[in-house]
Image (spheres, rainbow, N blue to C red):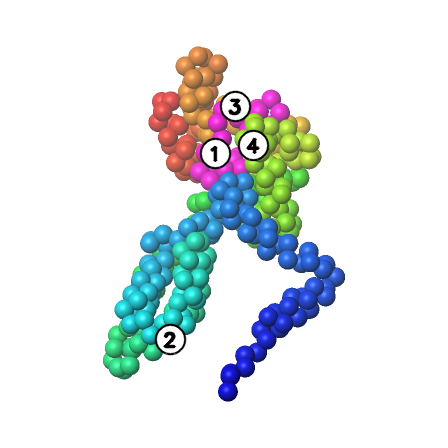
Amino acid sequence: GQRKHPKYGWVALAVIAASLLNPYGWKIFSPIFSHLTDLTSPTASGIGAIQEWRRTGLADAPLFWILLITAWGLALRDRTKEDLFWAPALFAFGLWGAAQVRNPALFAVVCLPLLAKRISHERAAMAAAIVLLVFSLWGTRNRRSAPVRWERLPRGAADFLAKTNIDGKTFTDYEFGGYWAWRFGGRRLGFYDGRYLFHGLLAQTTQARNEGRLSGLLESKGIELAVVGYGREHFPPRFPRDRWALIYWDDAAMVFSKRGKNNRVREYALTDPEYVDALQKAVQQGSINRADLLAELERHRSEVGFSVRNHVLTSLFK
């Protein structure tokens, strides 16, 4: 007789209806739609801001690409009924794994069971397992020796603020938000981090930064301290020196303080570690004395320690 299939459509509708029985109703799915929207945005709140959302390269996950090519090669060569069954899953998870560096590990869920059935000999299976293990360890060789890229985080800035006991409503760059929350555990609140609830605020500050009015926006929000990185903006500076003082800088970050807030801290009034061309022009025009600038760089080296930016600036103006 004719084989009867379960009514999966009715089951799916029942599951969807049951999911709506919550205090938020359909809005509980809004983070999913927000996620999908953000993935298509290359700048403010999407893949341009979050590294784990960038596309997967060969160097990022070599084992993923090996498994992907091997699985599809075997499936296209044999074209069995089992291959046809697994093909949609291989396609979907392969596409997903290639789209973002956060996803390749999920491909193994559908790939390894299929590959395991193709290896019937015990020694061949052991050899394949060894190869997979070697590639897995090779792919994480740098992460084992340097699990945290400290040079990219404002560790020095955080230590400086904690040591000097300088406090105030603080702005931190989006990339620094997660570290800031981990470093201070809520004792010093940052401005935002990579969670979805901050994406609207990220778009707002990104637009203000691109339009050259970031400091004005932060002042309107009562910000007194700013911990920011380098290299994304053009002159004029984000924090005009007539309203903000540079009180700390190293190779990872700068700390600006609203004038009148932390007068007891000696500022770096002459040094501009971000806009070197403008600093060089000021020295050439005589608005900044070369000897005074070198003295301030020497003070910075004694207070902060070795800095690549300090070394470059000192070499440039000697």
Name the amino acid type tagged 1. Arg
Region rendered in magenta: 228-254
Disc 4: CA contacts within 10 A as few (<14), some (14-19) or many (>=20): some
Query: Position of 54 compared to 225: left or right?
Result: left
Q: Residue at x 55, y 44 (%)?
A: 45
- The mark that comes first in sequence, 4 or 2, is 2
SS assignment at label 2:
helix
**Label 1 near label 4: C-beta < 8 Å?**
yes
Q: Residue at x 45, y 44 (%)?
A: 152
Say which mark, if any, is on residue 209. Answer: 4
Q: Position of residue 267 (x, y in %)?
A: 55, 28
Which residue corresponds to mark 1? Answer: 232
Residue in front for this viewpoint, 218 or 72: 72
Which residue corresponds to mark 2? Answer: 82
In the image, residue 201 above or below residue 11: above
Name the amino acid type tagged 2. Glu
Is residue 134 visible in this depiction of the protein? no
Mark 4 and mark 1: Cα distance apart in space: 9 Å
Q: Position of residue 257 (x, y in %)?
A: 61, 32
Q: Does the magenta portion include 229?
A: yes
Which residue corresponds to mark 3? Answer: 236
Q: Residue at x 55, y 47 (%)?
A: 38
Mark 4 and mark 2: Cα distance apart in space: 54 Å
Q: Residue at x 62, y 25 (%)?
A: 243
- The mark that comes first in sequence, 4 or 3, is 4
SS assignment at label 3:
loop
Name the amino acid type tagged 3. Pro
For the view shown, which residue lies furthest in the top direction? 285
Q: Main secondary structure of the magenta part?
A: loop
**Label 2 near label 4: C-beta < 8 Å?**
no
